[in-house]
Structure formats: C-alpha cells, structure tokens
Image (cartoon, rainbow, N blue to C red):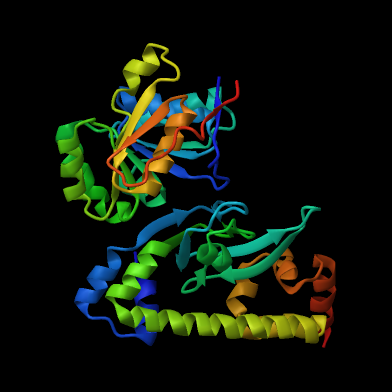
Amino acid sequence: LHYQTAIEMRTKQTIAIIGLGELGKRLGTAFAVGKDRVLLFDKDELEARSLAAQLKESHANYDIEALTCSADACWEADVIILTVANEEQANVANYIREYANQKIVVNTSGDHNEANDLQQLLPHSRIITAFHDLPTRLAGNAINTECNVDGEDADAIEIIAELARLMDFKPVTRGCTKQVSTDETILVG
Amino acid sequence: MYDVLFTKLAEKISLTQEETDLFKTFLTPKKLRRKQYLLQEGDVCKYVAFVEKGALRSYTTDDKGSDYILQFALEGWWISDMYSLLTGEAATQNIDAIEDSELVLISKAAQEEIMQRIPKYEHYMRLLLQNAYIAAQRRINNMASLTTEDKYKKLVDTYPDIVQRVPQHMIASYLGLTPETLSRARKQMSRK
C-alpha cells in the first residue's frame, strides 16, 4: 500500500534526525522507503553509527549517515527533526541556532507550548509540530491514519506533510492560512 | 559562515551593523557534498545560492543524456535557475556541486523582504543582474564568433580558477566542445 502525490520533488532533500530515542529510530527506519538523504545524530555516537549501518545493510540504496556533530548535521540539512527530550531542547536549540536559520525544524513533542518555546529559541526557523504519536501508531500497524502537521509556514507544512504521506499517514494540517489538501493523495496500491 | 557574502556585498554597498544583523536573519546556510544536487530539472527553483566555499555548476541534459554546462560558480559567485525562480515554472536546469561546498541560500520571499527592508540590497541586485546580463551576452558572442583555441584561451585568461579546479570534460561541455576537440586544441596551444 502506498500513495502517489501530485507534488513529488525530484531534488533529494537532506533530513537531520537529532536524537535517537524510539521516535528518532522509527523515523530513521521509516524514511528508508523514500529517496531523501538522512543524517542521524545522537549524543551516543555508537547508537547513531550502529543504526545507520543496520539500515544501510537492510536498504542498500538508503542514503543514510551518522554524524558526530549536531551542528554539522543541521548545516547540511534542509529539514531538522528534533526528537530530544524536552529538558534537552533548549541546549540543542542554542547549539544549532545558527545552522537552522530559515530551515524547517520539526517539534515532535506534540505540545504547542513546547513549539512556542522552540520558536523563541530558534526565532528564524520554520517550526512545524508533527510526528509525536508516531511510535504508537507504527507499532500498532495502523495504516492510513491521520497525522497532524501544524505550523505557520505553508511550504514547510507541505514538505512535512509529504514525509507523513511517505509513511502512509494522511496529513491533517492546522494553524496555516493555506491548507494542504489531502485530496491530491491518490491511493494506487 | 557568511564572510565571503558580506565581503562581496561590501564591494558594492555599505551596510550598517544593524542592517547586516537583519540581513543575516533571512539567510539559509547549507552544506552540499560533491555530486549532490541543489536543484533538479522539473522542480521549481526556490532559491538563489551564493557560494561561500566550493564549486557548483548548472547544466541541461538533452534527450540522448548529454550534459551542456551553462555556468560554473566558485567562491563569491551566485547561481540559480533565474527563469524558474522568477516565473515559478519548473526548472530546465540542474545545479549540482563539483566540490564539497558551503552555500548561502536566499529564498524568493526572503529576497523580496530584504529588498523592501534594506533598499541598498535592491541596488546591489540591479548591479548583479546587469553584470550577469553582460556576461551572458559576452558568452553568446564568444560561442558564436571565436575559434576553439580562442574560446579556451579566453576562459583561461578570464577565469583561471575554473580551468585549475574543474575537470576537463566539464570545461569542454561549457565551451560546447567534445573532450577530444578540447584536448587537441590544448595540445596545439602548448606547442605554440
């Protein structure tokens, strides 16, 4: 089962996953079916290296790499997904602020107050809230369920909605003047 | 991270510290590894890119899969598919990195906002586009009127860094020659 969308991009994006807890690992694994380049960072370097090696082995064409510096990963990335614990968020944000300027940063806490805090910490980044309940859904083999993608930047919402579709979720957007239509999603298999 | 950009800007316009700080808030720093794409044909171009470090090229590909290089961009140069950026239509060019590169990207919306809030930048862009137009005209004239040897000599004289850093087959493509023709021309020139 997969979806074909009307906005498929040809240029490969680079996605940095900062923090490899359960959600970070699941996202890293889920993106293997796409064509984007994925950079993994965790303060436990061995954890990041081992996940990258394991995914590369199971998906030979997966462009995935573990980096030892979160700032480097964010410098290279187009999309930054923060999956660090809430209490670590401020430290990480301070460290990556310069490199995350004008980039999409995904807040995965699911808490809109946290998203507002993150926006204050990264004032010139495009903050999107998404993916917070993914582990539960993916673990439950839930397919074709809705996935909230919230934020203020229409283009950023569209890009994250596309990542949600990649994982067979139906993006539902809020907090944006331009709604992402789910009608353009055509079930093909 | 933005040293080369602000040095280049300072050659044409003088920004206050306040304007520089404001300008930086609109910039997207981006690292690109060798052979990675900044833009692929068919996507809409959303950025102009300034090269802080490294080298990029833009090119088109014909039906037979042959590449035609339109532009190189080394440190201090700008590169984009301006047609796609300005019209919102799909890009006809590919842009990729010839070397590991550090770029500064400015989106179309950010460009507009910078020009509105820092009018000096509009003046800078006018000069930049003017020079780009002159360079494009010169390139068309050279392609139409110069001999193979003169085309290469002109490139060596005008952009010695490109000849030093870019592989010969790419130079040949940029000059509209086959690699073999370029190789023969270089041999003949070295004998003179």
Rendering quarter of residue B173: bottom right
Say if B172 sits above or below A122 in the image. below
Q: Which residue is painted at 42% across and 31% down in the image?
A: A164
Q: Which residue is painted at 55% across and 51% down in the image?
A: B36
Q: In x, y percent, where is residue B55?
A: 54, 65
Which is nearer the eye, A186 or A42? Answer: A186
Q: Which residue is painted at 54% across and 32% down in the image?
A: A62
Say if A164 sits above or below A157 in the image. above
Say if A3 sits above or below B117 in the image. above
Q: Is residue A87 visible?
A: yes
Rendering quarter of residue A129: top left
Q: Is residue B153 visible?
A: no
Rendering quarter of residue B14: bottom left
Q: In x, y percent, where is residue B113?
A: 32, 68
Quadrant location of the N terminus of chain B? bottom left
Residue at the extreme top: A140
Q: In x, y percent, where is residue A49?
A: 41, 31
Q: In x, y percent, where is residue A140?
A: 38, 11
Say if A82 sits above or below B102 in the image. above
Which is nearer the eye, B184 or B110? Answer: B110
Q: Tell me: A180 left or right of A97.
A: right
Q: Which residue is painted at 48% across and 36% down in the image?
A: A64
Quadrant location of the C terminus of chain B? bottom right
